[in-house]
Image: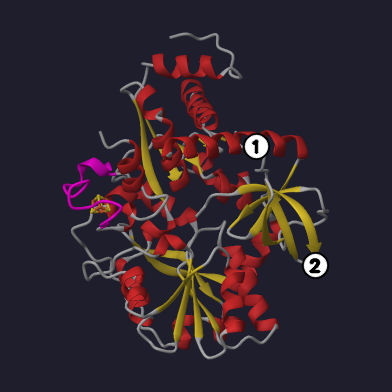
Amino acid sequence: MQLKINPNDIKDIVEFINNYDKKTIKIMEVCGTHTMAIAKSGIKTILPENIKLISGPGCPVCVTAINRIDEVLALSQNPKVLIATFGDMFKVPGSRPGVNLASLKSMGAKIEMIYSAMDALLIAENNPEYEVVFLGIGFETTAPGTAVAIKEAKERNIKNFSVFSMHKFVEPALRVLLDSKEIEIDAFICPGHVSTILGIKGFKFLADEYKKPSVISGFEPEDILTAIYKIIMQIEKNTAIVENEYLRIVNLDGNKFAQKFIEDVFEPVDDVWRGLGVIPRSGMGIKDIYSDFDTVKRFDIKLNFEDKVTICKCGDIIKGKIEPKECSLFAKICSPENPIGPCMVSSEGACAAYYKYLRF
Amino acid sequence: MCLAVPLKLVEIDGNDAVAELDGIKMKIRIDFVKDVKVGDYVYVHAGFAINKLDEELAKENLELFREVANAAKNKSE
Ligand code: SF4
């Protein structure tokens, strides 16, 4: 092993990682955007056998339970409802094969693709004859925007707007994964943009309580390689801290304004995750003072908290138990054109990433 | 969806703003970034600026971003 390397020189880092053969290290990349970046850059091809990157539960669409999808699909059949959603949700199938928001839209359901929660509010203002439902999907990075939309709807008295909150906190899911000991994880690449909101502080529990070396990383290949290098160094030195490699935009405390918006509008509630089941206090429920804007209350939806088993193996992929290729449907029956599960739909899904870049 | 893009602020009106990248303008919100002014760079996620960026770093980032975007474009062509 070459020990004297210049950690600022990416060639040195690549060579170091490539030649590292001392220990087996399993690194979970929490965030789906990292999964995509890793697949695209071909980083896996330079890793030695003993270093494994495993995908984690950081693709918001993928962790949404199939019951929620079914509930959304059912709601879209209400003739008064107009659903506004990020594009990632469009092709996620529910329990009935081939039925998704896209197919229902083609059959006349009112469904609009939007880029920001504020767009949904605007649609509500411009279409008073419809009940506009915004699908709140995402972790701490996306939830603050939803919170702004809800607050503004209240301030501006926009009565035909509500949010179906499926927003989630990242920490409880990581704790469940670590506590369950179902899979071994030695270290973490922490999600860059969630860290922008939560700060380095948000991931200290990984190092302090679970003694897992963790590096907050950006999304360029250089960032991810540097993160892997730093993880190896921590393991070699037998320490566990949270390092911040994404200095460009992540700081210690995160974005306090965004955090405050989450706190003002949401409260932790028990929520079901695909593959992980019900995790206490892992969901972002809309607080009572904003209950007028809570889709679940407005339409009296009886949420189903069962984590239904389906033929799709996304649940195991989210937990890092298997790789997409280990699903017997991968690239055979299941493809981006005909996705069987959300991991093949989402631009951050592991199956989609593997299909696009690592299929052969 | 979790992607965030560095953009330059070209107009600010309260919490509403217009940000730009290579001539493409986009309406965004700046509720989470205080004391920003026209000309500043911000990181934008799902229509919201989630952080202010140091100008030097922003430019570096933009270069990377363009490289990636171009590489992706070339690949798909
Ligand atoms: S390949 Fe398709 S069916 Fe298999 S786990 Fe991925 S999304 Fe599910």
CA neighbours of label 1 inside 10 A, class few (<14), some (14 to 19), many (20+): some
User: Front-most of A163 and A358?
Assistant: A358
| Magenta residues (range) | A321-339
Amino acid type of the residue tagged 2 in the rendering: Gly
Disc 2 from disc 1: Cα separation: 27 Å
Q: For label 2, count other residues whose C-alpha is less than 10 Å away and answer few (under 14), some (14-19) or many (20+).
A: few
Tally the numbered discs. 2
Residues B23 and A202: in front is: B23
Q: Chain of mark 2?
A: B
Q: Is residue A263 above or below residue A321?
A: below
Is A288 left, or right, of A232 in this rendering? right
Q: What percent of the width, then of the height, locates residue A68? A: 35, 71
Residue A277 falls in image quadrant: bottom left
The residue under the point 59% across, 88% down is A159
Q: Residue at x 48, y 28 (%)?
A: A228
Q: How far across and how far down the image is residue A172, in percent?
A: 45, 56
Give the colour scheme of this rendering.
Answer: secondary structure
Residue A95 in picture, x, y percent from top left: 24, 69
For label 1, the SS is helix
Quadrant of image for the N terminus of chain A = top left
Nearest to N terminus: mark 2 or mark 1: 2
Q: Quadrant of the C terminus of chain A?
A: top left
**Which residue lies under the disc numbered 2?**
B14
* Residue A301: in magenta span: no
Query: Which residue is nearer to you in this view: A160 or A223?
Result: A160
The residue beneath circle 1 is B61
Task: Identify the residue at horizontal 79%, vertical 48% (top origin).
Answer: B40
Q: Are marks 2 and 1 on the same chain?
A: yes
**Magenta stretch: dominant SS?**
loop
Instruction: Name which residue type carries label 1.
Output: Asn
Is A326 in the magenta?
Answer: yes
